[in-house]
Image: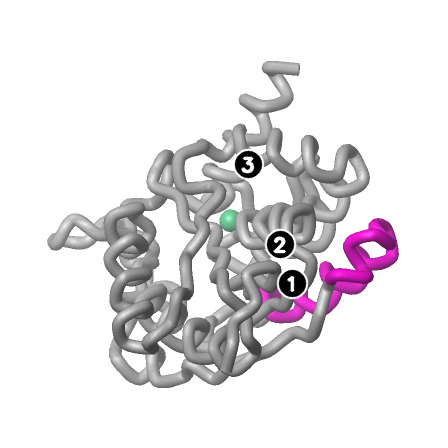
Amino acid sequence: MSQHSDTALVLFSGGQDSATCLAWALDRFARVETVGFDYGQRHRVELACRPAFRERLTEAFPGWAARLGPDHLLDAGVLKSLGKTAMTEDVEIEMQANGLPSTFVPGRNLLFFTLAGALALRRSAAVLVGGMCETDYSGYPDCRADTLKAQERTLQLGLGSGLTIEAPLMHIDKAGTWALAETLGGEALLGLIAEHTHTCYLGDRSHRHAWGYGCGHCPACELRAGGWERWRAAQ
Ligand code: ZN
């Protein structure tokens, strides 16, 4: 099965970072498909944001609508069975003795890229796009450039393919992520990301800030809000 270098598969969770990556991919590739994972996440709102964001994006950007192919939702529920994390169970969000936050789901991105790689092969996509970032991230080792580079090589060898991984946010901070969204789609895209993506670890959709919905205090909200404020201050 041949792969098309103009076809990308975006790992799209429904959060700010992967939504920005989706726009980035639509700006560059002739055909773009999305994949999401149901891993038993506590807050289902992120999954609910996925179709809503795609729909609004195609309404607001007809040029991108012509490039956007189907969405795929894969079952990664085995992650939940592996043990307690703050993303899958009612566990306190805190730094653990091993130096990793309790929101870290061990193996999550490794599994996601493996599943996405297999799907990409079936869909003839040559590029995987992910929103991982090691600049002002939460300390997750599977978000580092080295990890992705090694996994790209593993997928190439293990799948016998020329599949590559692109992580356009890897070396920019959260302020840079907002700036990238504005470059790609102006105020219209910023508005869609604020309204129709979800980042808050507590699943809060009742408090609306300029940067979107969230509790405003969890580590994910602090990153998203801090980036917004730094980017706005630089305008
Ligand atoms: Zn929050």
Q: How far apart are marks 2 and 3 (CA)?
A: 12 Å
- Residue drawn at 33 percent across, 51 percent down: 143
Q: Are marks 2 and 1 in contact (CB under 8 Å)?
A: yes
Please say if 45 is above or below 174.
below
Badge 3 marks a residue whose secondary structure is: helix
Between disc 2 and disc 1, the foreground one is 1
**Which of the numbered marks, if any, corresponds to residue 177?**
3
What secondary structure predominates along the stretch shown in magenta? helix
Label total for image: 3
Residue denoted by label 2? 22
Does residue 22 appear left or right of residue 66 in this picture? left
In the rendered structure, find residue 32 and report the number of the disc placed on it.
1
| Residue that protrudes farthest toward the top in the picture | 234
- Residue 48 magenta: yes
Q: Counting residues from the N terminus, which is met first, the one under dot 2 or under dot 3? A: 2
Numbered mark located on residue 171 in the image = none
How many other residues sit within 10 Å of disc 1, few (<14), some (14-19) or many (≥20)? many
Q: Which amino acid type is marked by label 1? A: Val
